Amino acid sequence: MKQTQFVKSNSVSWDEFEALCEKNSAESLPVNFPNLYRKVCNDLAIAQSRQYSPVLIEQINRLVQLGQKRLYLSRSNQFSEIWHVARTAFPRALYENRLMLGINLLAFWGLALIAFIWVTIDPDAAYTFLGQGTVLNIEQMYNPSGSVQSAERGASQDLMMFGVYIYNNIGIAFQMFAGGVLFCVGAAFFLLFNSFYFGAVAAHIVNVGFEGPFFSFVITHGSFELTAIIIASAAGCQIGYGLLNPGQYTRAHAMKQAAQKALPLIVGAFLMLVIAAFIEAFWSPRDIANEVKYLVGSGCWAYVIFRLYRGMRYGA
């Protein structure tokens, strides 16, 4: 191929690529930008192998350098993009999915309250919900004079538990999300299980008189953790509902639309779970007066509820 033909067949794509490279760094690049970058690199290799004019080779080489710079700049801005999602896209998604989110909130806390009252009135019902082994483990964990409460944790253990908590939290959230995708049925099951589990554990701990260690431990990180799990469930249910009721679209198209609508919820829930794991690892087990933990925990709950209300009410 002659140089003139090579330039003619690629000049439009080069102009478009250069325009993308010169976009404001705050603007997101299209998803196919890496492919465009690889094509320009390939064009440079072709021009060099065919020994086209040095001016043309220099022109394409400049595009490669611009693309490389833009790619690295995009990677450095990933944290700012996550922050943008947390501050803007996540609240907007709370508003757009407010009906499904409201249903999940009512279902979780309603069922948890039922389990709490049930086990409070009938203590033996705890064994129906939790099983004898689970009940014994919970009692050992929150017994004020037990080995778990009296043991001291070092910094390395805190760091290890941070990873464990992230793994567990994200596992539960993924169950809720994936369960919702299965026509909402799976999410209903996991929501039922987790809400009854939480309500039954809380009531049993109160019944045996270990409420101090338990509530002082869970109150702070629970605000982010429990709310994030419910949000993940709502995101899954939104997609599952799209499959159940696609309307005028095909199920595949309806699912794609619902997924786009729910994606910021997943990102927001993930960030909340990371915060919850950090608090649970480095703050919740600290030997601090319960009154201080209740005060800090109440502040966290007030903040989470306020942001949730602002998002569902105003999308902000």
Image: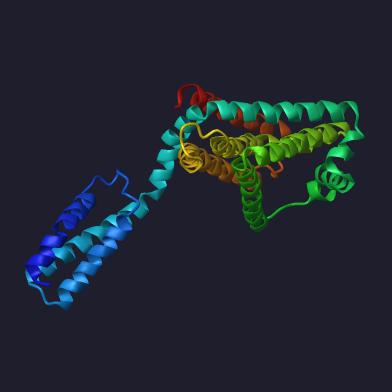
Examine the image and state in which quarter residue 183 appears.
top right
The C terminus - image quarter: top left
Q: Is residue 41 visible?
A: yes
Q: Residue at x 14, y 77 (%)?
A: 50
Residue 301, percent from left and from top: 61, 29
Residue 281, percent from left and from top: 65, 48
Instruction: Decide which of 203, 258 is in the foreground and name it.
Output: 258
Residue 187, percent from left and from top: 66, 39
* 260, above or below 47, in the image: above
The N terminus - image quarter: bottom left
Instruction: Decide which of 101, 254 is in the foreground and name it.
Output: 254
Count of all numbered marks drawn on residues in the image: 0
Instruction: Decide which of 122, 15 is in the foreground and name it.
Output: 15
Colour theme: rainbow
Residue 276, percent from left and from top: 61, 42
Left or right position of 315 against 232: left
Q: Residue at x 65, y 36 (%)?
A: 226
Left or right position of 84 against 279: left
Examine the image and state in which quarter residue 126 appears.
top right
Left or right position of 31 against 153: left
Q: Is residue 217 visible?
A: no
